[in-house]
Amino acid sequence: MAPETAKTTPQAGQEVDGTKKKRSRPARGQRRYRREVKAADDLANSKEAGVPATRGVSWRVTAKAGGRISDKRVIFTADSSRFITFNATRIKVFNTSTGLPLHVLSLSSYLEQAVCTAVQPNPANPLQLYTASSDGIIRLWNIEGGSLVQFWDVGEHITDMVINPKQPKYAYVITQSEEKTASETTARSVKYTCHRFGFETRKKKVLLKTKKPLLALEASADGNYMAVASRAMAAVFDTDSLSELSRYESDEEITSLAVHPTGQSIAVGDIRGRITIWYNVIATSKQNAVREVLHWHPHRVNDLAFTSDGGYLLSGGNEMVLVVWQLRTRHKQFLPRLGSEIFSIAVSPDQTSYALYHKDNTVRLISAINLTVKRVVTGLQFATSIGDQQTLRTGLLVEPKSKAIVLEGYPGHLQFYDVADDSSVLQVEVIPNPVSQLDDGNGSRINARITHVAFSADAAWMATSEERTSIEDGQSQNFLKFWEYDENAQSYKVVTRMDQPHKGPITSLKISGTSLIAVTTSEDGTFKIWQLAKTAHSDVKEHWLCTSWGTYQNLPAYDATFSNDGSIIAIAFGQLITIWDAFGSRLHGVLASPLPRSPIRRVRAVGTSHLISCTDDRVYVWNLLSCTLLWSLRLHVHSIAVDPSQSRFVVLAHEDSLPGSKHSPAIRRTATRLLIFETGSPTPLASSSLAVPCFSAVFRPKKAESDLVLLNQNGELEVLSQNDTEGPRVVKKIEEQPSSRTSLTNLYQNQPTQPTAQPYKATSAIVFDISAPSHVLPPPTQMIMSFLNSFMVPRVSDDTVVDAITEKVEEAETVEETVDESDGGLIKREAVDIVFKEVLVSV
């Protein structure tokens, strides 16, 4: 839950009770970053960015979900009934027995531009915990209420923190800072320091200072000594005198550290998979220490953990195997096939559970009795795959039934994520092997990825496409699958699979929102229409098959979209947009942009009569009823999303593509510009510069209006809701007669005239440019009738004239009654004369 005191947070150096302390000045790096943020805010309203100013409608972040479950080791409470995970901005408390979240503590309103780097329970109060953040502040929180109790400013960037149970009034922290140099042109060096910070005295004492990164900090169970490790050495310090007891150099890079709870020994893991146990670490002489090496892991040891009684040592790495070492007999137990690389290991104080955090952003609770998985807590899996995937090829989708966000999570899997509950609701294994490196049977390796996903309107059907590329020769194969939702299994099952449906890579996959018709496009220059058909097999009653296909001038097809009523399909062939009948696959028109510089990469239908197309450097908005271009903007778009409930869309553009940006070059290369448009105007409804780059966006429908969901580079889902700064706007509604006409008939047939309140007003004729290519023009009969109608004046009956005059006179009388008598009747007489003149002219 959100902290209760977010709006009344004291300034740095103060306590919540109001005791004033000296306010420390922000570090130079923080001041520089704040200037960059202010420049980004100024750019949001700047007219020099190539985008017109906004129109008074703002969007604000109302919720955050996803991200990494835990940036570091999972923490158990003293009674082992709960465990705690944390990421950059949120802390979650889970029930160990059920695996369900109990409390969620949001830190975004307190940390602002900082991130949480360490969490430690309060030894004096089990209902409180300490947090350390990159802004150099240690905070004390109430877990259940989510309120801030007190905070202390250390003054340096904190990377890790440990609270010694023997000395609860101290915090041992690892800080990072820049050393000052005499010349500004010389690059500044970074120093790492291990401090002991006193909560009462607010003073620091240095234990260790080095220019090499300090990666681990551990305290003994009795609190008598502390151990700190860098990549090349491990040092042990006495907690009373703060003197260094022992130091051990390693010939290999150290990757993990663990302190024995009862004995005087520590264990370190290295990059070669070796585990070195150092005994008698509090000896004053290095010769008195005894070393023992355990080796099973073929790769680096990611984490080590001793059990509470010190009888066992747990280790894990990228082998996806938990190894349990019995220290007395050196006997090993294994828990294999855990599904993903092990990042960290935690042991509950009662020794009944192990908490493993994995690369797929999953926490698995293991029973210490029989080494079985008891509970699984899954986060947004894409958050830990960003470095491997770089981009999200499937984009963000919304499952129409549950409104869950759908995206590719662990390689080969689709994840359905509920942003409201911040939890994973379903995972579908699209590619049989969850590992991205597969074997085709001939000894060569292939890289498999999900490329496209689509849903039917009722979510009863799902379509996926995957691509498998050989690493040796670069040849690729495509597979198209149609899935049916199984109510009994509460998941999707494959009904139809097509191997190599196109000769080239599949570029798009869409399903109509009104009927069970799907379309695929490919770089081989073809598109194919797929429909659901009956089958004679008893096991499978229905299957999907290709009913038609088409091509246009041998151009590659990059994208396709259905109209909202499902009657037409717009397909982008090269630099052209072709309009096809969805049922008969007949070509009805071609749209050509006036600036054919690059091929059209994206096509989206908006509302009932508009179409959006995006090239590498421009955005175009078309009117399908008149086949005309409404407006265009120069933008380097990398993602686009359409609101299904309104005629608006959102564009994510790279900040470095906008002219006049005031960002520094480093910020411009990574920042993202968010623009929200309506189809009728090139002036955006909202414009904002996002400091954290975003991969994709999607509108999530609600009862009133849709929310905007963004996926940023941190793997977080940000939910944005509309906030109209101009207040409620009155929109005049136009009553329309019900009609069964479709977008296809609206394009090429005259709209029937409906009775209106003012039938005596003449309508303007439609003008066609006959110099355009023949395949763009409508049928000749439509042009001839439009030409003849332009010479005809509609006949107006006498009853219509009388009714119109009567209506105007009544309006004039109303105006006359509201005019003040002090005006001498001059204004009311002029008003009546003007009304009668309007009636005569109109007749």
Image (cartoon, helix red, strand yellow):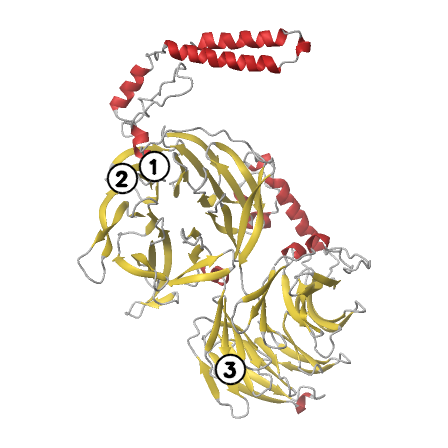
Residue 607, placed above or below residue 523: above
Q: Position of residue 422 (x, y in %)?
A: 52, 59
The disc labelled 1 sits on which kind of residue?
Leu
Q: Tell me what residue is drawn at x 63 percent, y 62 percent.
A: 116
User: Tag 3: residue type?
Assistant: Ala
Residue on which disc 3 sits: 368
Q: Quadrant of residue 624?
A: top left
Q: In this image, 10 relative to 687: left or right?
A: right
Structural distance between the alpha carbons of marks 3 and 2: 64 Å
> Which circle's residue, 1 or 2, is located before the other in the chain?
2
Residue 238, image quadrant: bottom right
Is any part of residue 252 visible from this angle? no
Residue 491 spot, x, y in % from top left? 36, 62
Vertical placement of residue 684 versus 282, above or below: above
Residue 172 horizontal side relative to residue 509, left or right: right
Q: Residues within 10 Å of mark 1 (few under 14, many from 20)?
A: some
